[in-house]
Image (cartoon, rainbow, N blue to C red):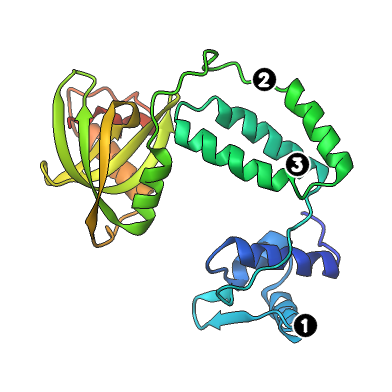
Amino acid sequence: MEKEKPRLARLTAILTQLQSKRMVTAKEIAKKHNVSVRTVYRDIRTLEKSGIPIVIEEGKGYTLMDGYRIPPVMFTQDEANALITAEQLIRKNKDQSLTEQYESAVTKIKSVLKYTQKEKTELLTDRIQVRNNLENKKTSNYLIQLQSAISNYQILKMDYRSLEDKQSQREIEPFALYTTQDNWVLIAFCKLRTDFRAFRLDCIQKIEIQENHFEPHQMTLQEYLEKCKEKYRNTPDTPLTQDQSTFAVNHKI
């Protein structure tokens, strides 16, 4: 079992945890820091007494008062190394918008590193290479825009050219994203088909965000994938050897 952190370090880590999510439960905090829920209650009271504006929502959890920000956190060398490794992986991603936004975020993170950490991360940047997508091809530029549309429940109008070279225009309610074999896939409710469909981002020609919003779909991504899995299991002509990540891609659009 992971050793319990010293209390000061734990209080600082809890603050970071509260700032990283909209809502955090006592059980989540207890699990992350290897303490009891009762200890979490004491830690929360200590933070409140020190002037941290923690909002408690009965039955939901804890959050920081909207607008409150703590100073930039300090990174360990291992955490900084992990960020640099992730940066190299994302640079090889085929979506241009993700690459640009991640590099912008990492630049801000690097600005709060200690001088010695900056030296080490610069060295590591030159010593890590990701060998897939060697030509660094960018085949899509819509990932960040789609992430925003998913989180804001925005209806999209989309020009789409399928892998069979069929052109169509769809009005969709974006639901989820996943990546497989270096390609990003959008799962969305298609109003033309009145059902969920999967769209490869490298086949999207154009996207227009509409003024209208849609009601959130009462389903998780995992539930969607399980439904796809069940559908293919009950279809005699479909091999059962496909892994879960490919089910949605094979849906007819």
Give the residue type at disc 1. Answer: Ser
- Identify the residue at horizontal 25%, vertical 44% (top origin): 208
**Mark 1, secondary structure of its residue:** loop
**Mark 2, secondary structure of its residue:** loop
Q: Residues within 10 Å of mark 3 (few under 14, many from 20)?
A: many
Residue 106: image location, x then y, percent: 65, 42
Whole-angstrom CA distance, mark 2 to mark 3, is 17 Å
Which dot marks residue 129? 2
Image quadrant where one finds the N terminus: bottom right
**Outermost residue toward the right?**
116
Give the residue type at disc 2. Answer: Gln
Residue 146: image location, x then y, percent: 36, 44
Q: Residues within 10 Å of mark 2 (few under 14, many from 20)?
A: few
- Identify the residue at horizontal 39%, vertical 23% (top origin): 139
Name the one closer to the observer, 105 or 32.
Answer: 105
Which dot marks residue 50? 1
Q: Dot 3 corresponds to which residue?
A: 80
**Mark 3, secondary structure of its residue:** helix
Q: Is residue 79 left or right of residue 164?
A: right
Q: Above or below — where is 162 with respect to 218?
A: above
